[in-house]
Image: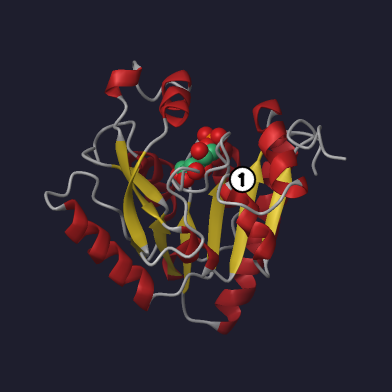
Amino acid sequence: VYSSEFELALGAAQIVREYLMNILDQQTEARILLATGNTQIQFLDALIALGGVDWSRLVLFHLDEYLGIKAENTASFCYYLRERVEKKVKPKQFHYIKGDATEPLTECDRYANLLKTQPIDLCFLGIGQNGHIAFNEPSVANFNDPHWVKLVKLEESTQQIQVKQGYFPNLDAVPQYAYTVTIPTILSSKKIICLASGINKAGIVKTALEEEITVSYPVSILRRHQNAHLFLDAHSASLLQ
Ligand code: F6R
């Protein structure tokens, strides 16, 4: 638990930097599954600013994307990651989910096959106020999901938050469906770095840590992972016992 969102971002970035430098001493390349969302912004900025990581040996993937959205749309996760990460660090490769793919089920298979053959060393996560990780909403989350990547319907509360954060002008403009990597895919990562800051996350953080592990709060499953780390600030931790 850090005193502020800035301290959290910096603390997590320092730990991730060290981990990446260590694994790149042992492997020729490493693979990261990145999250988007507001919580990641300061963390990604800090990680890039700290330096010392050889991004040319990193292969990057991401967790989710809206169905039907073009990469050039400023609300797309592809746009976010291109601007905030790819253009700044020039990774070895960035595998994006094609939001506007003409055959969405084929796109799920294409992305799933990439992930199956390239085990993930590190996964970054944020937490939705409803407990989702990636876009595994409580209504569609499955801890034993047979799929690696799937299409899901977004909950209205998730769509509303996207409007509130300014990514879309109104609820009708927010896509109803999205691609997401599934929970077993997230859990296959060797290390997970999950960030939650701000008072809006205090309720779900308390539930996820203190109540039972259940798909009603998908993030709670991280308690079963061997190497998952949750980074909080004073606000998101404020309801913990
Ligand atoms: C985004 C993602 C989502 C967000 C979550 C928290 O790629 O997978 O699960 O991490 O909705 O979003 P913020 O950080 O905006 O509160």
Picture residue at 38% right of the left edge, 48% below the top = 64
In the image: residue 7, left or right of residue 21: right
Of 190 and 25, nearer the camera is: 190
- Residue 126 placed where, x, y %? 57, 44
The C terminus sits in image quarter: top right
Q: Is there any visible trace of residue 38 in the rendered image?
A: no
Q: Quadrant of residue 187?
A: bottom right
> Which residue does the numbered mark 1 point to in the structure image?
46
Decide: is 223 above or below 227. Answer: above
Q: Report the coloring of the rendering.
A: secondary structure
The residue at the point 29 percent across, 53 percent down is 97
Residue 39 picture location, percent across and down: 58, 37
Q: Residue at x 66, y 37 (%)?
A: 204
> Front-most of 123 and 152?
152
Question: Please, is residue 76 above or below residue 12 in the view?
Answer: above
Q: Quick one: quadrant of the N terminus? A: top right
Amino acid type at circle 1 is Ala
Q: Is residue 207 above or below residue 187?
A: above
Q: Is mark 1 within 8 Å of ligand 1?
A: no
